[in-house]
Image (spheres, rainbow, N blue to C red):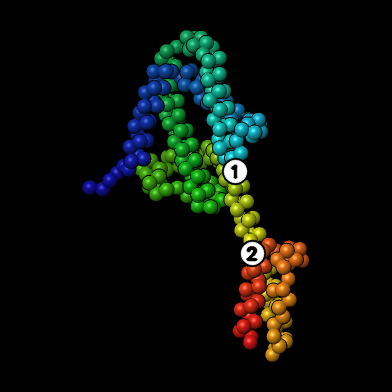
């Protein structure tokens, strides 16, 4: 028998029932208030993280850890402050709304909440998956794992995910930029090493041309007679690179002899 639902579909169905049931008993007023608090807390976390990171920079040198810690602290603190400060107002507003109206809208909100949460999950998965693949793609071409792409509810979640993708992409991009900086530093170091090797190869090529022009005469030993300190001052290379050039020149000299 062909499998209709995969694990993701079962999780989607289970959480949808939970969200809708909770929204029905809590009511529309409390649910929408909770959503507003989440949005405000996430906004504070997003925009306040750079300032928070500067304040905590003296306690941690790792930018990735510092960024995640700053966002987490700001979100948790702002979320609970907003939750406690608005609880009285929310309860007063709930008492003024007819229960049947409040719960009916709660069911509709539960459905929208499910799509919003799973849409955010889809967008986050697509962005992280594309980042790990090293590809910067637009929302129409972002790839997701097969278990998500082939899910029966995958298309519904994908549509919701594309709607919230700009916000999710900006939030994840703010975190992953520190990883990009680390990779950029590594690439710069590799580029510098490559440039140094190119310089060494160019130097050896010049020596080869000189030896070829002198055919029959013994290779000059002036480089070997100089001290490493003198060569470092003249060429700007360190002892390891100088030794490498000397060995290459010796090999070339032996071949020509």
Looking at the image, residue 220 sits to the left or right of residue 163; the answer is: right
Establish if 85 lies above or below 116.
above
Residue at the image position 61 percent from the left and 39 percent from the top: 61
| Residue 198 in sight | no
Counting residues from the start of the chain, the first of labels 2 and 1 encountered is 1
Establish if 93 lies above or below 34.
above
- Local SS, label 2: helix
Disc nearest the viewer among 2 and 1: 2
Marks 2 and 1 in Cβ contact (< 8 Å): no
Camera-side residue: 134 or 136?
134
Establish if 156 lies above or below 237.
above
Residue at the image position 53 percent from the left and 46 percent from the top: 139
Mark 2 crowdedness (10 Å alpha carbons): few <14, some 14-19, many ≥20: few
Residue picked out by circle 2: 240
Camera-side residue: 111 or 73?
73
**How far across and down, in percent of the image, does residue 174 sit?**
59, 39
Residue 205 sits in quarter: bottom right
Quarter occupied by the C terminus: bottom right
**How far across and down, in percent of the image, does residue 172 sit?**
55, 40
Mark 1 crowdedness (10 Å alpha carbons): few <14, some 14-19, many ≥20: some
Camera-side residue: 133 or 87?
133
Residue at the image position 42 percent from the left and 48 percent from the top: 145
Mark on residue 48?
none
Extreme residue toward the right, this view: 234
Residue picked out by circle 1: 178
Looking at the image, residue 150 sits to the left or right of residue 171; the answer is: left
**How far across and down, in percent of the image, does residue 253 sit?**
65, 82
How many callouts does the rendering have? Answer: 2
């Amino acid at each position: 028998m062909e499998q209709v639902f995969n694990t993701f579909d079962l999780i989607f169905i289970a959480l949808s029932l939970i969200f809708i049931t909770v929204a029905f008993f809590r009511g529309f007023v409390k649910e929408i208030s909770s959503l507003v608090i989440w949005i405000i807390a996430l906004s504070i976390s997003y925009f306040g993280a750079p300032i928070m990171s500067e304040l905590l920079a003296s306690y941690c040198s790792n930018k990735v850890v510092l960024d995640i810690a700053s966002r987490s602290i700001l979100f948790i603190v702002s979320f609970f402050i907003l939750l406690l400060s608005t609880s009285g107002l929310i309860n007063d507003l709930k008492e003024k709304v007819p229960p049947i109206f409040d719960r009916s809208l709660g069911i509709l909100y539960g459905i929208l909440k499910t799509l919003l949460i799973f849409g955010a999950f889809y967008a986050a998965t697509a962005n992280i998956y594309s980042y790990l693949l090293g590809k910067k793609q637009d929302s129409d071409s972002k790839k997701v794992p097969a278990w998500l792409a082939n899910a029966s509810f995958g298309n519904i979640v994908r549509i919701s995910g594309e709607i919230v993708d700009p916000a999710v992409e900006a939030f994840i991009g703010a975190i992953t930029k520190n990883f990009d900086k680390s990779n950029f530093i590594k690439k710069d170091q590799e580029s510098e090493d490559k440039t140094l090797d190119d310089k060494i190869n160019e130097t050896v090529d010049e020596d080869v041309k000189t030896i070829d022009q002198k055919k029959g005469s013994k290779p000059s030993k002036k480089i070997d007679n100089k001290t490493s300190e003198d060569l470092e001052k003249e060429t700007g290379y360190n002892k390891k690179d100088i030794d490498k050039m000397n060995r290459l020149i010796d090999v070339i000299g032996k071949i020509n002899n």
